[in-house]
């Protein structure tokens, strides 16, 4: 019996006294409806369709509801079959749609399973770690104002020896005003481009000698500290990298399929016109 079934069995019988060792069916029948068997795996599959917060609930708590739902589904399906609903165009059209969706999921799962390897994840991690090792993050403050002229006035005040944090607390319109313009630590890609480029180019203790414009307004920036960009361990980064690669592999696969296929489609405007004609 594998670990999954051992844990499941433990959850089902938790609290019972120990007894003689019996052979355990890893997927027992939990109900029979008009001769059709419902097994524990069916209950587990139904559980996996629940919202994430309910999926984490103890099986013993949701087992009765799931089982009754499966019984109801079986009863209604049997009745519909006896009435011949499985032969109707409505049923066949819906089954065709469901069949396509299932086949797509199976195809994607098989493709990703073949291409998302530990070696690929490690290779991506090594590239990212190497790149991160050449980068740095900074601890900065800024003063945000609405006009370039006002920003120039503040730079002149700094040149005259006034304290940056005090000017930010008094004049900045940004949310960091209450902290004297303190933005904390940030690295590449975390700020809008003009701001980031100007901040990363500053030496420690230096401020911008010209206002920096972004969509938020005009900035005066001071860099207080600089340190190497922290590189997470492979285990810390593995899950995030795997998700990124999963998305890339799936997207590239669909792009390839589209390139190999003949696709004809109509725009929404064309559909409306066709309905009107």
Image (cartoon, helix red, strand yellow):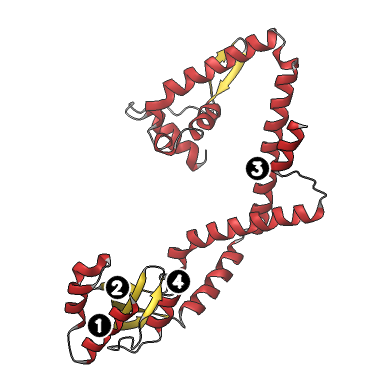
The Cα–Cα distance between marks 3 and 1, rounded to whole angstroms, is 59 Å
The Cα–Cα distance between marks 3 and 2, rounded to whole angstroms, is 51 Å
**Which residue is drawn at the image coordinates 35% and 30% (left, top)?**
14
Secondary-structure class at tag 1: helix
| Earlier-in-chain disc, 3 versus 2 | 3
Secondary-structure class at tag 2: strand
Q: Are there few (<14), some (14-19), or many (20+) residues within 10 Å of tag 2?
A: many
Secondary-structure class at tag 3: helix
The Cα–Cα distance between marks 4 and 2, rounded to whole angstroms, is 23 Å
| Position above or below: 248 against 66 | below
| Earlier-in-chain disc, 4 versus 1 | 1
**Relative horizontal placement of residue 44, taking residue 167 as reference (left or right):** right
The residue carrying mark 1 is 154
Q: Nearer the viewer, residue 72 or 257?
A: 257
Pointers 3 and 2 in contact (C-beta within 8 Å): no
| Earlier-in-chain disc, 4 versus 2 | 2
Whole-percent x, y for residue 79 in the image? 63, 9
Q: Nearer the viewer, residue 163 or 59?
A: 163
The residue carrying mark 2 is 145
**Relative horizontal placement of residue 204, taking residue 85 as reference (left or right):** left
| Position above or below: 250 against 91 | below
The residue carrying mark 4 is 189
Count the marks. Answer: 4
Q: Which dot, 4 or 1, sits closer to the camera? A: 1
The residue carrying mark 3 is 105
């Amino acid at each position: 019996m594998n670990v999954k079934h051992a844990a499941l069995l433990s959850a089902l019988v938790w609290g019972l006294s120990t007894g003689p060792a019996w052979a355990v069916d890893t997927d027992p029948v939990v109900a029979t409806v008009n001769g059709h068997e419902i097994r524990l795996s069916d209950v587990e599959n139904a559980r996996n369709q629940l919202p994430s917060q309910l999926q984490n609930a103890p099986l013993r708590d949701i087992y009765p509801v799931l089982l009754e739902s499966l019984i109801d589904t079986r009863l209604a399906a049997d009745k519909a079959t006896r009435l011949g609903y499985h032969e109707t165009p409505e049923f066949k059209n819906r089954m065709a749609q469901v069949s396509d969706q299932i086949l797509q999921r199976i195809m994607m799962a098989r493709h990703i399973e073949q291409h998302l390897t530990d070696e690929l994840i490690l290779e991506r991690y090594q590239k990212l770690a190497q790149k991160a090792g050449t980068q740095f993050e900074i601890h900065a403050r800024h003063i945000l104002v609405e006009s370039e002229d006002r920003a120039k006035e503040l730079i002149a005040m700094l040149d005259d020896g006034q304290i940056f944090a005090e000017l930010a607390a008094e004049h900045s319109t940004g949310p960091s005003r209450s902290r004297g313009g303190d933005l904390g630590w940030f690295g590449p890609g975390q700020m809008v481009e003009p701001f980031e480029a100007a901040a990363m180019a500053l030496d420690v203790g230096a401020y911008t000698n010209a206002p920096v414009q972004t969509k938020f307004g005009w900035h005066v920036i001071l860099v207080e500290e600089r340190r190497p960009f922290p590189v997470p361990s492979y285990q810390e980064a593995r899950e995030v990298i795997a998700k990124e690669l999963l998305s890339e592999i799936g997207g590239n696969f669909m792009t390839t399929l589209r390139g190999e296929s003949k696709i004809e489609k109509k725009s929404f405007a064309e559909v409306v016109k066709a309905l009107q004609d």
